[in-house]
Structure formats: structure tokens, C-alpha cells
Image: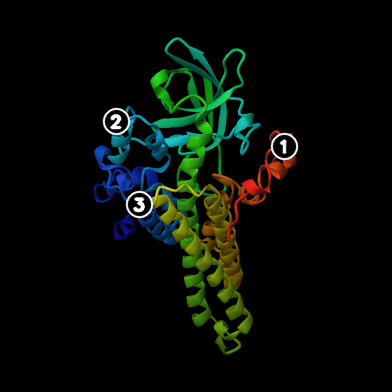
Amino acid sequence: MAVLQRHEAWNPVALRAHQDLADWAGLDLAPRVGGAAWGASDMARLFRECGRRDVELRDLIGAGHARLLALAATRRFDPVLSAVAKSAAYCAIAITEPDAGSDLRALATAARPVDRGYVLDGIKQYISRISECTHFIVFAAVQRVAQEPSISAFLVPRDAPGLATEAMRPSGLATVSWGRVHLRRTRVPIAARIGGEGEGFSLFRHHFCYWRTMIAAVAIGSAQAAIDQTAGWMKSRHVFGAPIGRFSHLQQTMAHWIARLRMAWLLAESVAEQIDNRVWPVADAAMLKAEAIEAALGATEWAMTVFGGAGYDTATGLEKRYRDLLGLRIADGTSDVLRSQVARAFLGERLYDLSMSRAPSDGRASDSQSRRFW
């Protein structure tokens, strides 16, 4: 990370092309596309270190959402992945819509089959890196006559005809662009479809199992740095003739957050190890992302209060950590939605279907289909 000291004003996506960082983009890609094939465990440790400096450095290392392309049972996306590994390309992911977020079944963006391809129409929003990316991975509902729409994913170049972007202003995570994507009769070839029709759910689960693990690692690192900073303040800040670190209520609360973050990291190591063993612990990854983010937010907010007025000063850096973590709480699955996924895995499908106002799955879902976490 020493090279980053020379870059006070930086965009993490743009920094990927810096000669000292040239190999970082391909760390978690396969050697055949120029990657280093780092496993999830090693990447989680690196993401944590990025978070210790700045949450936004999550965009500096690894392939990011381009990893989803590697999940398809084809090598036709290898040229794009090779470009990503060389920092010559970057993929943003477009899922959320004005009236649909966590419920993929409700996506309104349509993919209408035409000769040798599809025509995409719809609006996606709250997308990071809309200006920096070269491609969008778009989730859409394929519409065929007399069939239920099937959720599928497509790789769409940013300069595709009919694709337009609209800037929005985030309250955090602001070193990269953020906004909407408008798709108006955007035609893509059939080769742009990632996987088969209807494989969008599977691609989503597998990709975000990995990505949520990395986001959790970033958050843990950020909060651990905030605690370290606060420990130094507790030793140096004097009130009534002695350091404030002598107060037991501060010591007790610090111990609480240290333990929460430590437990979150142990879970991160467990999830990453499972991924390295080609297991996709979707519920564990959901649990990890939700609880790691909430622990990181709680620890950082506490750190700000210990600093008092200085904690509210941008010079301290804590308020930026807090705002960026708020963004991570929402991105890639909110804490409430992810906790619902954990409960769904524990209780089984029947109660989940009822909570979604859907009829139980033919009455066959039962407690025997649920998962036990201990």
C-alpha cells in the first residue's frame, strides 16, 4: 500500500492502470486470462487491508463484478477478462431498478428475443462506476410468448447504441461515479448472454457469495483501523489531568467492539475457506455481510463519539469511514434482506413463502429442508 501514499487525490478505478499497481486487477482471475488465481482467503485478507486505509480501495484490487463472467461455462468472455486483468477494462453491475431491488423476480427490464440476439429496454439505478466502466453486466427478464419471464444476465458495452447514463450524487463512496443506466432498444448478440436463459439467479447467488465476503472484509478492516485510531486517542487525550483511556466505560465498550469485529473476521475466514473448497455458502455469506457491516458501523460510530468534536471533523477521517460504511450497508444486499435469507435457510421455504405473501411451495417445504447453523 505504500504506493498509495503518493496519490492524495485518486479514483481507485483509474489507479488500477498505474504501473506500480498493474497486476492487482487480475489477482483473483485465472492464469489463462492473465490472472494470479488468488483464492478467496488471500483476497479477503487483502480487502481487509484496503479497508484499513479507505473503504473505496475495494475498487482497486481484483476483477470486481467482472468475476461473474468467469462463472459462465464458456470462454467467450476471456478477451474481456484479459482486458480487466490488464486494467484496460472494468465491469459495473446493473441490477436495481426504480421499482425493484432485492426481488429479482420483479425486474422490469426486459430482454426481448430477436434474430441472433436480444433487445433490452429498462432503467437500472444506484450503479457504481457508471463512468469508469467499459461494460455493464445487466440483469433482465427474458420475455417469450406463453412462458414466464426468466431472469438472465447480459454483458453490454458501455458505448452500446441505446445505452445512456445519468449521474446521481451519493452521500458516500464518492470517488467513483454513481447513477442510472437507461436502456432503450439496446440490441445485444446472443453471445452477450452470460450463461443460459434463466440462469440469472444462479449467477447472482454464486457471484455475491464471493463479493459479499470481500465487502465484509473491507468493512472489518475499516472498523479495525477506527478502533486503532481511537485507542491512540484514548492514550493521548487528557481530561481532568489524565488520559481518557482510564475510564472503564470506554475500556468496556472498546472491548465489546473489538470482540464483535474479531468474531466477524473469524466468520469471514470460514466463508472464504469454503469458497476456496468450491462450496458456495450463500447463507453464511449473507450472515457475514450483514453482521460485519453492522459491527463496523457500530464500532465506527462509537469511535466518533469518543473523539467528541474531533470525530465530527473531516480531518479525523472517521466521518468518511462512517458514510462509506453506510453505503456498504445498502449495497449488494441490505442487512435486513440478508438476515431474512439467513432465517429462510434456518426455517425452510414454507415460512419464507408465507412472509412473501406467496403460497407455500406445493406444501412440500418443511423443517426437514431447513439448514442448521450449529
Q: Position of residue 325 (x, y in %)?
A: 54, 55
Q: Is residue 312 visible?
A: no
Q: Position of residue 145 (x, y in %)?
A: 59, 12
Q: Is residue 295 visible?
A: yes
Residue at mark 1:
363
107 versus 143 height, above or below:
below
Residue 350 falls left or right of residue 32: right
Say which residue appears at 25% left-offset and 38% top-offset.
32
Identify the amino acid type marked 1.
Gly
Say which residue appears at 32% left-offset and 30% top-offset.
75
Q: CA distance from mark 3 to mark 1?
A: 40 Å
Numbered disc in front, either 3 or 2:
3
Identify the amino acid type marked 3.
Gly
Q: Quadrant of the C terminus?
A: bottom right
Q: Position of residue 38 (x, y in %)?
A: 32, 51
Q: Secondary structure at mark 1?
A: loop
